[in-house]
Amino acid sequence: MKVNRKWMILAIMFLLLNMAVATQYAVTKIGYVYTIVHPSDASIRYIGSDNSSDGIRVLRVSGSNVTDIQLVLRLGDIYSSNMKKTFTAAFGLVNEETYPINITYINVSSSNYTYMKIWLHGNRTANANSTLTDPSSVFMWDNNTIVNATNTTAWTLASGDANSSGMCYNVSDRTNCTIPTPWDETAHVRYSINNSNATSGVSDFVWVQITVDIPESVESIGAHTGTIWIHLESDAGA
């Protein structure tokens, strides 16, 4: 079959044009913004309560309170074998997001044995080591073992109001159930010593109890340091 030369040229030009269009790229852009704040003012924020052996909050800023702010838990200065110390409100977690946040599990990383037990609970002054003394207690960490399963919800922080000046033990009535969280100018954190109890799914905060339980025989003396990891999740946007 004889092919018209003009049609052949047009077909080749059309093919080349489509190839050129297919290999072109565009560039677009969009700006972004976020704000870095003090950990006591964050959307999931830490607050202090109990004092350590030096009379300052267990939860405190280590070093500068202006740049590179680092929170630390000072759990006492001098321990020896067979000693146990419990901080029923070592610190609190407060949700300021406008949707609920679930705490799933807690683990601790350290080069030493932690000799620590950690609970979530609602009664700031009660010992969470038994549900008889605090029925809201949830055991989370036992020395080097995760207690609450990683795929379950241990505690739900009710939706917050994006206002770090207070926390609420019943978010359905913020007018009457909000507790102030003022600044501690020595520890450089917000804090509360109010004894209104927190309830999972009802309150936007929870207390964290830490017990340091030193056995008769320890693997090493000297400073023991580590990091507590609190794992959170939310169904918002799902």
Image: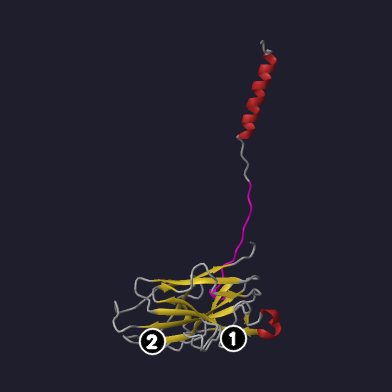
Of residues 229 and 9, the one drawn nearer to the viewer in this rendering: 229
Q: Name the residue under label 2.
A: 84
Provide the secondary structure element on which disc 2 rests: strand
Look at the image and tell me in which quarter the N terminus lies: top right
**Other residues around mark 1 within 10 Å, as few (<14) / some (14–19) / many (≥20):** some
Q: Which residue lies furthest to the top in this view?
A: 2
Look at the image and tell me in which quarter the C terminus lies: bottom right
Amino acid type of the residue tagged 2 in the rendering: Lys
Provide the secondary structure element on which disc 1 rests: loop
Amino acid type of the residue tagged 1 in the rendering: Asn
Indicate the position of residue 2 as horizontal and vertical percent values.
67, 10
Indicate the position of residue 50 as horizontal and vertical percent values.
49, 86
**The label number, if any, that marks residue 216 in the structure image:** none
**Quarter of the rendering containing residue 122:** bottom right
Residue 40 appears in the picture as rendered: yes
Classified by dominant secondary structure, the portion drawn in magenta counts as loop
Of residues 61 and 136, the one drawn nearer to the viewer in this rendering: 136
Write the residue at 64% across / 21% down.
12
Mark found first going from the N terminus, 2 or 1: 2
Q: Name the residue under label 1.
A: 197
Q: Magenta region: which residues? A: 28-41
Of residues 4 and 183, the one drawn nearer to the viewer in this rendering: 4
